[in-house]
Image (cartoon, rainbow, N blue to C red):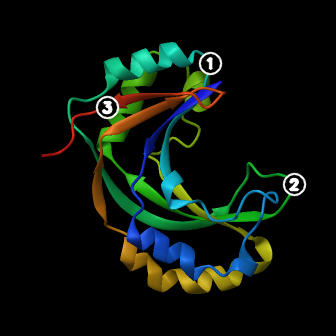
Amino acid sequence: VGWAFLPVPPLEAAIRIQRAVKDEWLWLHSQRQSGRVSPEKFHLSLLLKLQDVQGASERLRHCAPRNPLHIRVQQLYFHKVDRITDADVWSVGIAYTSPDVRTLKDKFLEGASEEARKLHDPYGSEGHTSLVYVKAEAKEEVEGILGDLRESVVGLEFTLDKIVVEDGKRRQQIIQLPSSS
């Protein structure tokens, strides 16, 4: 099973937000993983749970626009992570708005059943980037620092020119879009 994502550049404002979260507030999934997402791994999930990775890659190539994808930061969010069920974990992240991403997803999912749409695009949004995962005990402290940081990130705009399709063994296929000139 694979997925498709858009690599997101390491935005300075996002890194400042990460640094504002104290180490003792972080939720650690395991000894190997920090509660901070490495800036080199910032991404916007495009499509999830792709059974036929090769077919999905070909379909994405066919659906891909002839221009880079324009992205705008819509909000800085802080919410409970429902997919983590063995701990009370909250995530700070950036939500995006992008008619380009919405069009790409809709084109890819055209003709798909509602069940398949929810499987591949479970959030029904134009994407987000998780920045840090924190323990519930630190919720009030984290909420307290986010107010001033919101204005540093909301409204930022950038373009993305690469779609990555990755299979279950982490083998990647790159779909290069024209870059903005």
Image coords of residue 47 (percent x, y):
52, 33
- Residue, disc 1: 51
Callout 1 environment at 10 Å: few (<14), some (14 to 19), or many (20+)?
some
Q: Classify residue 36 as left or right of residue 109.
A: right
Q: Local crowd at mark 2 within 10 Å, few (<14), some, or many (≥20)?
A: few
Quarter assignment of residue 28 = bottom right
The mark that comes first in sequence, 1 or 3, is: 1
Q: Which residue is mark 2?
A: 86
Q: Give the residue displayed 12% in from the left and 46% down from the top.
A: 181
Is 127 positioned to the left or the right of 51 in the image? Answer: left
* Residue 156 pos. (x, y %): 31, 65
Q: Amino acid at mark 3?
A: Gln
Mark 2 secondary-structure assignment: loop
User: Which sits in the foreground, 114 or 89?
Assistant: 89
Q: List the residue tagged with mark 3.
A: 176
Res. 2 image quadrant: top right
Dot 2 or dot 3: first in sequence order is 2
The residue under the point 70% across, 63% down is 34
Tell me the SS state at disc 1: loop
Residue 80 appears in the rendering: yes
